Image: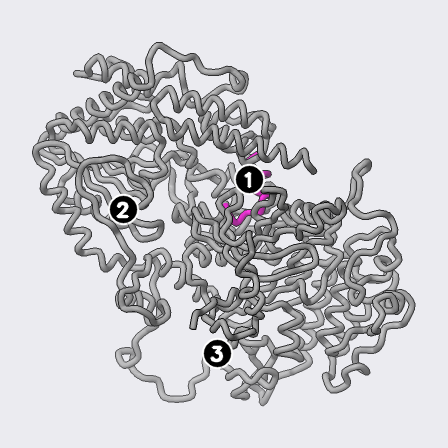
Amino acid sequence: MSQVVCPQCANECDEAHKFCPVCGFPIAELLSNKEDPLIGTTLPGGYQILELIGVGGMGRVYRAEQKILGRTVAVKIIHPHLLGDESASARFITEARATSRLNHPNSVGIIDFGKKDGQLYIVMEFLRGRDLARVAYEDGPLPFPRIIDVLCQVLAALTEAHHLGIIHRDLKPENIVLQPLRMGGDFVKVVDFGLAKIKETAGTPGITMPGIVCGTPDYMAPEQGRGDPLDGRSDLYACGVILFQLLTGRLPFESDSPTRVVLMHMTMPLPNPAHVAPDRNIPPALLDVTRKALEKDAADRYQTAHEFEAALKAALATITASKGPASGRGSVVCNACRAVVPRNQKFCGECGTRIAIPGAVTEPRRAPADRPSTAVSLPLPFVGREDDLEWLDACRQTAHASLDAARIIGDPGVGKTRLLHEFLDLAAENGDFVVETGPDPWWAEVSYFALRKAILKLARLPEGGGSPDTWPGVTPEAKRGLAEIFDRTDPTVVASGQLWSKPAAGSLSSDDRRFIAAEALRWALMRAHEAEPRRLIILAIDDLQAVDGASKNAFTDVIAEPPLAPILVVAAHTSELDPGWDGSFRKLFGLPKDIAASLVRGGGPASGSSDLRVPPLYLDQLVRFGLEGGSEPPARMADLIALRIERLPQDARRTLQAVAVIGDAADRSALRRLLPDVPSFDDVLKVLTDAGMIEEQEVDPASGTRGRIALGSLRTAHPLIREIALATTPVAVRRHLHAKAAVDQEGEPLPLPLEVQALHAYHAQSSFEALMLLEQVADRARARGDQGGSVLALRRCLDLARRELFRGEL
């Protein structure tokens, strides 16, 4: 019998099942929609729709994959019958615009939105977990500490939303998703801003007519039922209703008529929760919080989400204190439900979980030799690559008469960079002259960047390339190539007054420029050989797939017509790139299952095929996820990284997003410019460093030592982390960060390379400026023989035009 994968718990279910036997998800809905015409289609941005996972009043929600990263996302598409309803379409876009400004760990993130073939869509993070209504039904009644913890996270999300002028207007248990943590407790996400209201400024029309009531009657504040103007206090009333419901198991007002329920919220006194659920023994502190949250007059309620959150935390402190010490030995907190338990109890009275007593000894300790440690050291050791190192060393041994090339190929996270660096360390220890190059620190494919860096180090030229006097033995062609690469009349820094002028065509054709660039590299390689005649010259190029096209062409051309000297060019790149090089290559795979399991002390991937290969980056993320208290890690590496990023503290996540936007050229001054409201970056950067998200190193531009950053002291720990951090940044936040990254404190353009200016303008959606800059990038790339770079810039121009058309339709 064929199987269908449950989108909620990933269990493989038989098609005969109507519900998932593990989590109860209605998989029959998926099977009945196999003929959905949207399944298999791809949206702009590379989001391929895979399966239907839910249907709501506004639209259908699908599981999709962002193909370029292999990351799971959710896509909401508005119902076709609502496309003609201007109010429904406006509400749908309002959800996208409102939520795309939210950047809080407890708010669902909107990654992208737009329109394709008449279909409005929103791309958002894919949530794994159960909504609060289901949790309360299946696990209830919930312990008081757990109720407080969940609502405090909801209120933390509302604090940011209200600060941005966004009112949810439809808070209810179904719009609160809980994800379990391995160490106990829940990670909460507030979802579905479909009825969100952005406070209108003067002259800005609303999306609902005055007096129209939106929301769910059971959770509707009195002023919302009357159709009065709303503010964040109506959301706080809804939180009060949810608190009442979780404490008592009942809604405060119930009726078969929705209109009757609204009237009851407006006119009837609040029932006493202690009388509704006398068996719960609700603490007086929580009764007081509930009464104040549900006051009829908004002026008598909590005025801010932060005030409501503080009141709940104070109530928790009162509850904890009232428990008192047990048997003179104090109390502990249950890891599963956060209930306060007497220290001498073996099991939690609320949920039945066995209690782990800190420092308790229930049996004689064994000698350390008899009880192996389960601690995992980070970073993980370099193991399982002996054959790969031997292959690289064999390539090194054969490069003795003329230039030879070798390539390490593999998917992101498989360990190419670490293998390359281990090899280069060994080569340097054996006396080889090692030079490294790679993508520009902005990851913008700055023309000639990798080539320029290689030539500077090989020929030991001063910064800027020096002058013809410092180019001994240079041929006329190489001299013209060096002048082209280091020409100060055509710098990468473009003055703001020259943004709109097209570059001069020049006297050289693109083929000429490609030829002389390769000649300049040949000259630099021979200069290195002449300076070190008894040493093997190794030119290493990491992340070749991200190197600019003009540099890639030069490397390819030199390998095709190699100089006669002992030189090894070794590169690492992803599988989809074919650079057209001669020479050998080695395909790199993940570590074998037994080695992976030993690295994580038995905490590795689930049992399966013995042929299973696990990427080292996944192992690293898996270990860190476990240490952070995560449970049920996603099977896909990109999903696991995204989940860890989503759970970072708010300032840490915002800082990671800023580092990802700036690139490897980040420093603290740049972070202060992008995030002026973060009081201090010391603690934030420590959190990110300890989490393995970023690396912070001393700046040493003169040394050329690998791992040191010439243009800044901060960078993401892995390019894939950077890409996923960018992809998970809400679209409005990403646009704002790119806009600020291109200017200084006074708003003047920074002296950035042309390609970097264009990249920031493109992602900032500064359409006119971006179009002008991208045209220049396309012209420059074409003039230097980089046809791929030219096409990419022009495609981005077309994408900008599509965005402008979408805006115009709204």
- Position of 393 compared to 517: left or right? left
**Residue beneath label 3, please?**
358
Front-lying residue, 185 or 253: 253
- Position of 628 compared to 549: left or right? right
* SS for callout 3: loop
Q: Is residue 768 above or below residue 540?
A: above
Q: In this view, does 39 lie above or below 471?
A: below
Q: Is residue 635 above or below residue 123?
A: below
In space, the residues marked 3 and 1 are separated at their CA atoms by 41 Å
**Residue beneath label 2, please?**
409
**Residue positioned most to the front:** 35
The structure residue drawn at horizontal position 86% and vertical position 58%, both measured from the top left corner, is: 223
Instruction: Name which of mark 2 and mark 3 comes first in the sequence.
Output: 3
Query: Amino acid under label 2?
Result: Ile
Query: Alpha-carbon neighbours of circle 3 within 10 Å: few (<14), some, or many (≥20)?
Result: few
* SS for callout 1: helix
Of badges 2 and 3, nearer the viewer stands: 2
Q: In which quarter of the image is residue 169?
A: bottom right
**Residue positioned most to the top:** 507
- Residue 777 x %, y %: 45, 24
